[in-house]
Amino acid sequence: MDENHVSGGISGAITDIESEEALLHAIKRYEFFRNINYDITNIAKNTGIDARKIFHIKQYLFYLDILENKDGTRTPFEPSVEPRSFL
């Protein structure tokens, strides 16, 4: 079996995380999260973290587009369907 495919998935799900379809889906989802404004209030309410802190985190992740990796290097925050570990 190809390592990029997942067995037992839901019909219609993206099974190849490196496909153009997956990248387009990731870009669409990132744009959605960049442009909504109610998420900050909801996250603050659900986590108990001050909304201003959530706002700054969102600015950092979605607008400054730079993340520091575990090894200290800095890279762009790019759309991907794969989870990214940077902590």
Image (cartoon, rainbow, N blue to C red):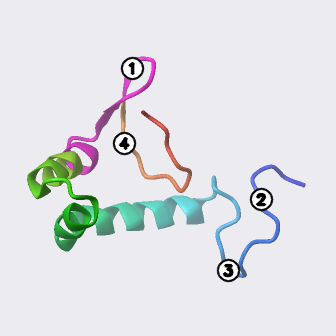
> Which secondary structure lies at badge 2?
loop
Locate residue 40: give its quadrant: bottom left
Q: Which amino acid type is shown beneath numbered disc 3?
A: Gly
Query: Pointer 4: residues within 10 angstroms few (<14), some, or many (20+)?
Result: some
Q: Which residue is drawn at 66% across and 74% down?
A: 13
Q: Do the residues labelled 4 and 2 touch (CB within 8 Å)?
A: no
The answer to whether residue 34 is magenta is no
Q: Which residue is drawn at 90% across and 55% down?
A: 1
Q: Are marks 1 and 3 in contact (CB under 8 Å)?
A: no
In this image, 16 relative to 55: left or right? right
Q: Residue at x 31, y 69 (%)?
A: 32
What segment is highlighted magenta in the picture? 60-74
Instruction: Quickly name the residue at label 4.
Output: 77
Instruction: Quickly name the residue at label 2.
Output: 5
Work out whether 53 lies above or below 12: above
Number of labels in the image equals: 4
Q: Which amino acid type is shown beneath numbered disc 2?
A: His
Any mark on residue 12, and which?
Answer: 3
> Picture coordinates of residue 3 (x, y %)?
80, 49
Instruction: Quickly name the residue at label 1.
Output: 73
Q: Which residue is drawn at 71% across and 78% down?
A: 10
Query: Pointer 3: residues within 10 angstroms few (<14), some, or many (20+)?
Result: few
> Which secondary structure lies at badge 1?
loop
